[in-house]
Image (tube, grey):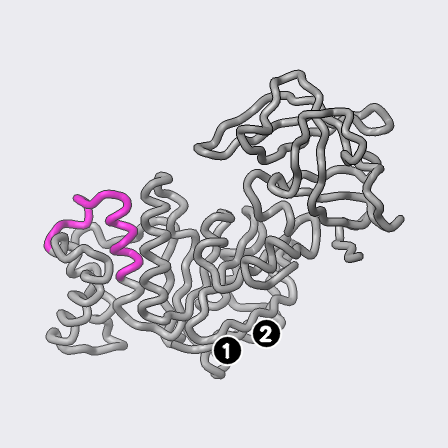
C-alpha cells in the first residue's frame, strides 16, 4: 500500500470547473470517502488520480512519486466502476486472473492460481470460479469486479460508486464485506459516493465535495457533529437536518450574526404540555412516521411573522402525540450559520 497526495489539482471542461484547487492527503491503509451530489466532481477526481484525465494545474503523487504525467497503466492503481464491467465470455476464475496476465505484469500460472484462490476465498466465491460471468447475480458480479481490483494488490484502489446499482439488501451486505476486506488487507482506498450511509460506515475520513471544491475533510464523527456549512450539515444525517430561520426560534439566545439554525431530529425533545414555560417553541403535529423502532414526528412550526416551517423530531413512544395536537419543543443542541451559510461558533 502507499500514500496518495492530491496537491492543488484543478480541472475544467470548457468553462465548467469540475475540480478546483483540490488538496487531499491519504495515508497508507486509509479508507477515504468523497461524498457529494451528482456533478460535484467526484468521478473527475478519481479519473485524475487514475490518469484517465490530465489536470490543468496541480500534482498527483503516489507513495511520494509524481505520477501527474504518467500513463494510467504505469500508476499501479485499480479502478472499480459503478457498472460491473466484466468480460462476459470469461468465467469467474479468468475474470479474476485477467489483471495478473497482463503483459506489463508477467506472473506464472501457479502464482495466478494462488492469488485468484486467495481473493475468491476473501470474497466467499470459491464455488463460483467456473461459473460464466453472465450467470451470476448482480451482487456476485460486483464482487468479481471488486475482486479483480483486489487480486493485483495495487498501491491505491479507486472506487466509483460500486454499490449504487444494487438493491438495498445487496448494497448493505457488500458494504460490510468491502469494509472487512479493506481492514483485512490494509488497503489504501479512495471511494466516491452520493450515499451518506456508505460514507459514514466505510470511511476513515470523509471529504465533502461541492461544485468541485472540497468544503470539509474529517472523520465521520467530526463531519456529522461539527459541519463547516449548511451544505455539509445537509449532506449527512437521516432524517435530514432541520434548517430554520432565526426568527422561528426567538427563545434561543444567539449572536446577531446567526441567520439560520440547524437542529437534528435526535437533538430535540417533545413535551406533551404545549404551555410549558421552558419550551423553546410550540408546534402542531402533522403526522407520525414509524421506522422500525424509531418514530419521527413531523411538525408545523409557525414563526413570529406567521410563516410555517416543517420540523422533524425523533421521539420515544411515550412522547407521541396525535396529528393536530400542539406540543412543546425543547432544543438540546443546535448549530448556527450566518447569512453565507457558513458555521458560526459561539
Relative image position of residue 343 (x, y in whole percent): 75, 54
**In the image, which residues are magenta?**
130-147
Identify whether 26 is placed above or below 234.
Answer: below
Identify the residue at horizontal 29%, vertical 51% (top origin).
Answer: 142
Question: Foreground: 253 or 190?
Answer: 253
Query: What predominant SS class does the magenta segment belong to?
Result: helix
Q: Residue furthest right?
A: 256
Q: Is residue 142 magenta?
A: yes
Identify the residue at horizontal 35%, vertical 39% (top origin).
Answer: 167
Lateral position of residue 320 relative to residue 125, left or right: right
On the image, numbered disc 2 is attached to which residue?
A: 7
- Could you classify mark 1 by the number of other residues whose Cα lies within 10 Å: few (under 14), some (14-19), or many (20 or more)? some
Where on the picture, by quarter, is residue 187?
A: bottom left
Label 2 – label 1 distance at C-alpha: 8 Å
**Mark 2 or mark 1: whose residue is earlier in sequence:** 2
Identify the residue at horizontal 65%, vertical 22% (top origin).
Answer: 285
Tag 1 secondary structure: strand
Identify the residue at horizontal 53%, vertical 26% (top origin).
Answer: 289
Lateral position of residue 62 relative to residue 313, left or right: left
On the image, numbered disc 1 is attached to which residue?
A: 61
- Could you classify mark 2 by the number of other residues whose Cα lies within 10 Å: few (under 14), some (14-19), or many (20 or more)? some
Where on the picture, by quarter, is residue 93?
A: bottom left
Identify whether 238 is placed above or below 35.
Answer: above
Residue 13 in view: no
Question: Foreground: 201 or 340?
Answer: 201
Mark 2 and mark 1 residues within 8 Å of each other at the beta carbon: yes
Lateral position of residue 164 relative to residue 42, left or right: left
Relative image position of residue 97 (x, y in whole percent): 19, 65
Q: Is residue 322 magenta?
A: no
Relative image position of residue 235 (x, y in whole percent): 59, 47
Q: Tell me the quadrant of the picture where the C terminus can be found.
A: bottom right
Amino acid at each position: 500500500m502507499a500514500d496518495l497526495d492530491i496537491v492543488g489539482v484543478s480541472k475544467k471542461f470548457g468553462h465548467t470547473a469540475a475540480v478546483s484547487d483540490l488538496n487531499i492527503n491519504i495515508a497508507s491503509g486509509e479508507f477515504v470517502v468523497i461524498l457529494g451530489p451528482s456533478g460535484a466532481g467526484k468521478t473527475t477526481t478519481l479519473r485524475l488520480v487514475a490518469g484517465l484525465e490530465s489536470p490543468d494545474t496541480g500534482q498527483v503523487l503516489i507513495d511520494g512519486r509524481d505520477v501527474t504525467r504518467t500513463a494510467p497503466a504505469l500508476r499501479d492503481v485499480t479502478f472499480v466502476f459503478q457498472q460491473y464491467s466484466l468480460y462476459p465470455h470469461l468465467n469467474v476464475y479468468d475474470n479474476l486472473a485477467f489483471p495478473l496476465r497482463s503483459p506489463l505484469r508477467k506472473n506464472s500460472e501457479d502464482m495466478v492460481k494462488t492469488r485468484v484462490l486467495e481473493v475468491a476465498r476473501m470474497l466467499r466465491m470459491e464455488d463460483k470460479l467456473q461459473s460464466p460471468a453472465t450467470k451470476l447475480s448482480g451482487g456476485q458480479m460486483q464482487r468479481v469486479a471488486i475482486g479483480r481490483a483486489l487480486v493485483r494488490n495495487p498501491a491505491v484502489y479507486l472506487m466509483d460508486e460500486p454499490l449504487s446499482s444494487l438493491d438495498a439488501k445487496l448494497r448493505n451486505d457488500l458494504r460490510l464485506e468491502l469494509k472487512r476486506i479493506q481492514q483485512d488487507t490494509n488497503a489504501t482506498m479512495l471511494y466516491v459516493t452520493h450515499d451518506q450511509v456508505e460514507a459514514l460506515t466505510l470511511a476513515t475520513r470523509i471529504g465533502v465535495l461541492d461544485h468541485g471544491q472540497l468544503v470539509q475533510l474529517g472523520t465521520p464523527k467530526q463531519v456529522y457533529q461539527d459541519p463547516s456549512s449548511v451544505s455539509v450539515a445537509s449532506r449527512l444525517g437521516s432524517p435530514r437536518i432541520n434548517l430554520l430561520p432565526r426568527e422561528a426560534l426567538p427563545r434561543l439566545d444567539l449572536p446577531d450574526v446567526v441567520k439560520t439554525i440547524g437542529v437534528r431530529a435526535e437533538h430535540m425533545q417533545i413535551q406533551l404540555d404545549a404551555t410549558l414555560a421552558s419550551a423553546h417553541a410550540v408546534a402542531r403535529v402533522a403526522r407520525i412516521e414509524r421506522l422500525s423502532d424509531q418514530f419521527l414526528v413531523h411538525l408545523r412550526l409557525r414563526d413570529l411573522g406567521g410563516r410555517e416551517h416543517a420540523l422533524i423530531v425523533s421521539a420515544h413512544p411515550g412522547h407521541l402525540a396525535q396529528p393536530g395536537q400542539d406540543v412543546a419543543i425543547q432544543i438540546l443542541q443546535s448549530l448556527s450559520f450566518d447569512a453565507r451559510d457558513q458555521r458560526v461558533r459561539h
